[in-house]
Image (spheres, rainbow, N blue to C red):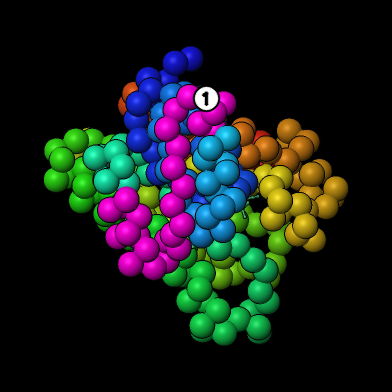
């Protein structure tokens, strides 16, 4: 299916790895131009950008930015506007994950989750809405939530769960606020996804796979396919939705 995304400008936070990189690949396949916004070393993300460009023929740039820093977010959008003059799509995908028993969580540690998963996502969305409004155009925001915001099998990650719950609520709240401006806001709910980071987490056991009705974890590309679809005109009736891409784990 042609999603009609050719020539669109998509920012993908956390685009240097895992689900975010999957999104960059799918956007590239669809002919969209991509901004990999990540705090991974720039030489690594620039190489990913160059590889995507040579494979798909679109324009891909990498910008080194920590989304939890308002200075970095301003710098990021300045560079995007310098390069492309506009932005059409924001994938709020970067997130801080981790396991912390409640006894071990200090307030500074809790704030790190808040700063990335809530403040970073908020800052990125605020600037995106401002640009769309100034340029009198619509756009698409897709937030990466997590099934742990709704149901969890693993204890010891309450800071992560709490902040992802906020992402789910924020998605609905922003959708109703900006929908009439033509700005779509939706979320995706991944369950268990195999990435370089999660394959080392101890709760990603064979036992866990038995909990997934389709019998296996997702690949980043499988999550990305749905997220990118939400940015197309074909998804024009989907607003403020949180789309379950857990292979049935939420059942
Ligand atoms: N992997 C899973 O099983 C799973 C399940 C549910 C939800 N999620 C969510 O999906 C999203 C992506 O997860 P993933 O597994 O692909 O992660 P990942 O660790 O594979 O990749 C995350 C990328 O984000 C970047 N990043 C992290 N914090 C950043 C920041 N503050 N500013 C800029 N870049 C930053 C990292 O450098 C990295 O390149 C996260 O929001 C995560 O909570 C993942």
Q: Nearest the camera: 219 or 54?
A: 54
Q: Is residue 134 visible?
A: yes
Q: Is mark 1 within 8 Å of ligand 1?
A: no
- Tell me residue 29's x, y (percent): 51, 24
Kindly state the secondary structure of the residue where label 1 is placed. helix
Residue in the image at 51% along x and 60% along y: 39
Residue shown at the point (44%, 28%) measured from the top left: 58
Q: Which residue is mark 1?
A: 56
Ligand 1 is found in the corner quadrant, namely bottom right
Q: Residue at x 44, y 16 (%)?
A: 2
177 shown above or below 8: below
Q: Any magenta on residue 64? A: yes
Question: Looking at the picture, how far across and down is residue 135, in whole percent?
Answer: 15, 40
Q: In the rendered structure, does residue 196 fall within the stretch colored magenta? A: no
In the displayed orientation, state which residue is furthest to the right. Answer: 206
* Residue 126 in which image quadrant: bottom left
In the image, the segment drawn in magenta is 52-79
């Amino acid at each position: 299916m042609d999603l009609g995304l050719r020539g669109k400008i998509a920012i993908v936070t956390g685009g240097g790895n895992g689900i975010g990189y999957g999104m960059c690949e799918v956007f590239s396949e669809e002919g969209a131009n991509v901004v990999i916004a990540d705090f991974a070393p720039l030489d690594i993300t620039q190489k990913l950008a160059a590889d995507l460009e040579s494979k798909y023929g679109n324009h891909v740039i990498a910008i080194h930015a920590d989304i939890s820093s308002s200075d970095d977010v301003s710098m990021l959008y300045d560079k995007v506007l310098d390069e492309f003059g506009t932005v059409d799509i924001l994938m709020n995908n970067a997130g801080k994950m981790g396991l912390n028993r409640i006894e071990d969580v200090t307030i500074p540690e809790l704030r790190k989750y808040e700063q990335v998963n809530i403040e970073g996502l908020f800052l990125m969305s605020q600037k995106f809405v401002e640009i769309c409004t100034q340029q009198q155009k619509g756009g698409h925001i897709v937030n990466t939530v997590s099934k742990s915001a709704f149901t969890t099998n693993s204890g010891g990650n309450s800071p992560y769960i709490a902040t992802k719950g906020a992402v789910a609520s924020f998605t609905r709240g922003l959708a109703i606020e900006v929908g009439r401006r033509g700005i779509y806001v939706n979320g995706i709910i991944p369950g268990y996804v195999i990435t370089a980071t999660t394959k080392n987490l101890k709760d990603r056991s064979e036992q866990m796979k038995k909990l997934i009705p389709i019998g296996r974890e997702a690949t980043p590309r499988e999550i990305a396919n749905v997220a990118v679809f939400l940015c197309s005109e074909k998804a024009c009736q989907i607003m403020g939705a949180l789309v379950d891409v857990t292979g049935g784990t939420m059942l």
